[in-house]
Image (cartoon, rainbow, N blue to C red):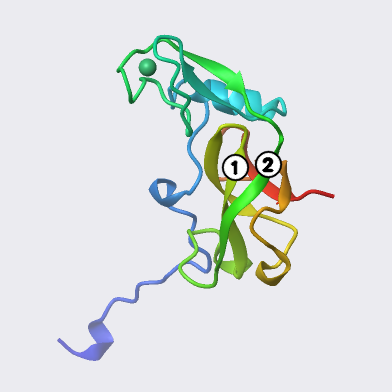
Amino acid sequence: MSEHDRETVELPETIELPRLLDFYELQTAEHTGIHEFYENLRAGTLTTTSCRDCGDLQFPPRVVCPECHSDELEYVELPDEGELFAFSTVRAGAPLGMESEVPFVTGIVEVGDVRLSSRIDGADYDELEIGDPVSLKIVEIEGGADHERVFFRFEPRA
Ligand SMILES: [Zn+2]
């Protein structure tokens, strides 16, 4: 076979984010058992689940209590202010769709009685200290799904 017989294949200029590698979960009742968490977040409130049977408070929200296996969970409100418990900066290996945003800060935030991991916006690593007060920030996610999506981040308290 001569090189003139070879077929040419082309690659697209841009490659759409593969759905399964999308960092953000699908957020409707059709797609996730914790859709109420996202509905609350869309309405401006960070919530999580608490077990009616044993009192366990979880984050992220669950559909079954990891302590007693009850499914009698209720959504409870978390404060929209917290404290930076730990933080680091991402310089490489960011999730797909976030590669252009490096370096960015991620951290563990103490919010009420839970600790959660979150992007920390609005500050460089060198400007932050453990114990810094931070506030909830809700971001809209564009693309990747056929419904509106939101997610939470935190930023230094103004
Ligand atoms: Zn329980």
Q: Residue under label 1, please give it.
A: 110
Q: Residue under label 2, please give it.
A: 82
* Ligand 1 found in image quarter: top left
Does residue 145 appear in this view?
no
Residue 7 lies in quadrant: bottom left
- The image position of residue 27, as x and y in percent, is 52, 30
Quarter containing the N terminus:
bottom left
Going from the N terminus, do you reach mark 2 or mark 1 first? 2
Depicted 99 relative to depicted 108: above or below: below
Ligand 1 within 8 Å of disc 2? The answer is no
Indicate left or right for 3 with 108 as reference. Answer: left
Q: Residues within 10 Å of mark 2 (few under 14, many from 20)?
A: many
Q: Residue sitting at 75 percent across and 58 percent down?
A: 122
In the image shown, does 134 or 5 lie closer to the viewer? 134
Indicate left or right for 66 with 44 as reference. Answer: left
Indicate left or right for 31 with 87 as reference. Answer: left
In the image shown, does 29 or 106 lie closer to the viewer? 106
- The image position of residue 112, as x and y in percent, is 62, 32
Q: Residues within 10 Å of mark 1 (few under 14, many from 20)?
A: many
Does residue 38 appear in this view?
yes
Q: Residue sitting at 24 percent across and 89 percent down?
A: 3
Q: Give amino acid for label 1.
A: Glu
Q: Give amino acid for label 2.
A: Gly
Question: What secondary structure is found at the residue carrying circle 1?
Answer: strand
In the image shown, does 9 or 134 lie closer to the viewer? 134
Q: Residue sitting at 48 percent across and 25 percent down?
A: 57
- The image position of residue 89, as x and y in percent, is 57, 67
Separation (CA) of disc 2 from disc 1:
5 Å
Q: Are marks 2 and 1 in contact (CB under 8 Å)?
A: yes
Question: What secondary structure is found at the residue carrying circle 2?
Answer: strand
In the image shown, does 82 or 48 lie closer to the viewer? 82
- The image position of residue 65, as x and y in percent, is 36, 21
